[in-house]
Image: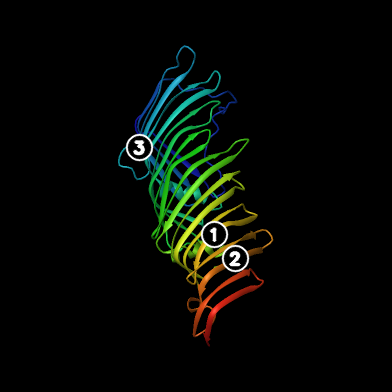
Amino acid sequence: LVDASLMLKRDGSGKFNLPDFSRTGGGQEASIPALPVSISNGAMHYTDETRKFTTSIKDIKADVSNPDASGSVEFSLKAKTHGSRRRNLFADGVYSPKDNRYGITLKLDGLDTAHYGNYALSLTSNSRRIVVKTGLLGAEMRFENGAEPSGTVRLSGAELEAAGLARPLTDVSARVKLSGRFLVEDASATYGTTAASASGWIGFGTDPAMDMKIHAKSDDLRELSGFLKPLKTRSIAGAGEGIVRFTGRPSSPAYSAFLKAQNLSLDGLFLSSAAITLKGDKRAVEIVHSGLELWKGAGWVKGVIDVEKGKLTLIGGVEGFRFASAARLLGLADAGGTGSAQFTAGGTLDIVAKDLHLAC
């Protein structure tokens, strides 16, 4: 077959224009075309009227062999996907009608992630939350009866826009291996001056589990204010770095984190340096260790944030702080002397001062 063309359409009601090949008009079983079959310069056009989406696969070269002694046939396919100047879709394999067994190797190189990704997202609840602007996808996959799909998927040069974020995620790349679970070997993205990377694995099936580690470093924490809206934080500034590890079930993982920052300003509270270790899950967050430099003194804080009940149990303290550094926060024109303090969230504040003088 030369210049063969297939038109596939999904109409406004969501129905496809696929004919029923299982029966002929006279009620007899449809005959199987004689083999071998060869197609050159073929094309397949697809339109989804429900999503206003149209795409084509062109320059198709396909071959199906004669059945061998067991009745199995071999097949191969080469084609161009949307926007590609060369063939970038390859598939080959074998199919046995006798026992309905198959083995397929699929290769993709430079698939237009924006074109296909946004259509895929339009079929989910995330269609208005995420927009893919650019990116290329590559893959080498193997599909067989009775086995999990295996292979490698690569994403490079992607740019994503997400609802609630002031700027896009750029330089998004990832390499994921599939072998019964998702093994993330190298994933990274940039958000302004913030660079993030991730690695680990996610397993599904009857006993889903995960172990993922995310590292991020920012030279300007103001860029991340959009991510802090759930914490009801009004303003943040400074530079920081953090490592978060997620373990357990993907639907409700536990996590541990180590965060550190320099020249941190949080809702008007200034910390020269801060280092905090956290652990928790979707129900509660525990601050297990901290070291803070507050008002030129050495501080600490620990406690539990009950996410489900919206309750905060927090205690902290600072030793050797200077009242001159705390004057502005306390609403004073000037102050002198040193002191120590202990506090509880929503509760008491105990201060011990030395050589104190205040100017209101």
The N terminus lies in quadrant: top left
State yes or no: discs 3 and 2 in contact (Cβ < 8 Å): no
Q: Which residue is mark 3?
A: 88
Residue occupying image coordinates x 55% and y 22%: 100
For label 3, the crowd category at 10 Å Cα-Cα, with few meaning under 14, some 14 to 19 and many 20 or more, is some
**Image-based side of 315 in relation to 52, left or right:** right
Secondary element type, mark 3 = loop
Q: Give the residue number, with chain letter if any, for mark 1.
A: 290
- In the picture, the disc for residue 316 is 2
Q: Would you say 160 lies left or right of 267 here?
A: left
Secondary element at tag 2: strand
- Report the residue that reaches farthest toward the left: 85
- Residue at 53 percent of width and 33 percent of height: 180
User: Marks 1 and 2: in contact by CB < 8 Å?
Assistant: yes
Residue drawn 69% across the image and 61% down it:
309
> Which amino acid, mark 2?
Gly
- Which badge, 2 or 1, is on the more N-terminal residue? 1
Judging from the image, what secondary structure is the residue with disc 1 in? strand
